[in-house]
Image (cartoon, rainbow, N blue to C red):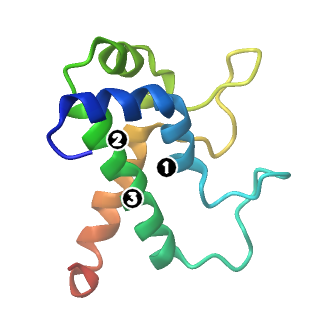
Amino acid sequence: TGKNPANKAKIAALIPFETILDNILECHLQDDTKMAHPDIDYDALCYVKQVWTKLTQDAFWSSLDSHAVREVQQAFRLWKPEVDNNGVPVDGAKSLMQEFCDAIVKLTGRPGKCG
């Protein structure tokens, strides 16, 4: 999307922020069971999450478009994990901030694999 505000607004309108959050937080899960794939490559998963995170940055975090700002403000899973119909957090569910904190902790233990 680059620096073009019109492109940022178009992308933000095409892909809801909640969908991007779901893809960042759940791309390692099987669709039918909500359990992790048994043969997942966590290094490859990191690259998939990077793409979705970059899209979030380009289309939402750096956008001044009112639609994009409103979607970020209304995003429940930004700070809190997914909940069931009774408001109870789903087992293993994370918020985006929890995912970022986990990534930082993992990176501190893997200095040789960064960059």
Disc 2 crowd, CA 10 A, few/some/many (<14, 14-19, 20+): many
Residue labelled with disc 2: 56
Mark 2: which amino acid?
A: Thr
* Quadrant, the N terminus: top left
| Spatial separation of the CA atoms under disc 2 and disc 1 | 10 Å
Q: Residues within 10 Å of mark 3 (few under 14, many from 20)?
A: few
Residue 108, image x and y in percent?
24, 70
- Front residue of 45/100: it is 45
Instruction: Identify which residue is drawn at 37% across, 30% down.
Output: 10
On the picture, is 104 further left or further right than 39? left
**SS for tag 2?**
helix
Front-most of residues 95 and 50? 50
Percent of width and height locating residue 58: 26, 42
Amino acid under label 1? Ile
Q: Which mark is residue 51?
A: 3
The residue wearing badge 1 is: 24
Tell me if residue 13 comes above or below residue 92 in the rendering.
Answer: above
